[in-house]
């Protein structure tokens, strides 16, 4: 069942906030697991990889690519948050089950972004540990927080 669509700002603002928070949370988690614990990359290498989707391999030799990577990451995350808020505003079931909705959303985002990486010719096939780490990152630190923040922002009770 679909509900009446709210005015754009009523959807976009909670979505943008949720996307921003999701971007921070997933970055903190990934930086802790990939840089601090895993020693698999550096902070600058992490964001240069993001920027390489737009700049290609030249991103790794360009110091300003780090800033571009951060900006691209936040813009994309905010867009995902607004998209989730739009769907949630139209579909009550999404708001009623934030844990399930956020889990499905996180997996959808992860798979979709891997398609973007393939299209940008930057995809690297992860081993099983990195794949599992990516699922945790996208579900626990991106999808579920966005679902709860959007639910609160759209005035829904946080149901489990």
Image: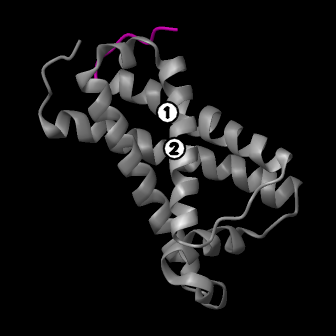
Verify whether residue 99 appears in magenta.
no
Q: Nearer the viewer, residue 2 or 102?
A: 2
Total marks drawn? 2
Chosen colour scheme: one colour
Viewer-nearest residue: 84 or 28: 84
Q: Is residue 155 magenta?
A: yes
Point 46% across, 58% down: residue: 74
Q: Dot 1 corresponds to which residue?
A: 105
Mark 2 touching mark 1, by CB under 8 A? yes
State the residue position of label 2. Answer: 109
Q: Which mark is residue 76?
A: none
Q: Residue at x 23, y 24 (%)?
A: 90
Structural crowding at the residue carrying mark 2, measured as other residues with C-alpha within 10 Å and reported as few (<14), some (14–19) or many (≥20)? some
Q: Residue at x 66, y 84 (%)?
A: 60
Query: Which is more toward the observer, 55 or 33?
Result: 55
Per the rendered image, the range of residues in magenta is 154-160
Q: Main secondary structure of the magenta part?
A: loop
Q: Secondary structure at mark 2?
A: helix
On screen, residue 143 above or below 49: above
């Amino acid at each position: 069942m679909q509900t009446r669509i709210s005015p754009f700002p009523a959807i976009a603002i909670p979505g943008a906030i949720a996307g921003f928070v999701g971007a921070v949370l997933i970055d903190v988690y990934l930086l802790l697991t990939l840089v601090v614990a895993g020693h698999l990359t550096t902070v600058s290498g992490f964001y240069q990889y993001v920027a390489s989707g737009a700049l290609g391999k030249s991103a790794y030799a360009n110091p300003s690519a780090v800033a571009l990577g951060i900006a691209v990451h936040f813009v994309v995350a905010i867009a995902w948050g607004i998209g989730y808020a739009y769907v949630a505003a139209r579909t009550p079931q999404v708001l009623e089950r934030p844990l399930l909705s956020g889990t499905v959303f996180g997996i959808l985002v992860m798979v979709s972004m891997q398609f973007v990486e393939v299209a940008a010719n930057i995809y690297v096939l992860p081993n099983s540990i990195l794949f599992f780490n990516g699922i945790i990152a996208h579900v626990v630190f991106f999808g579920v927080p966005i679902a709860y923040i959007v639910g609160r922002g759209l005035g829904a009770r946080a149901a489990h």
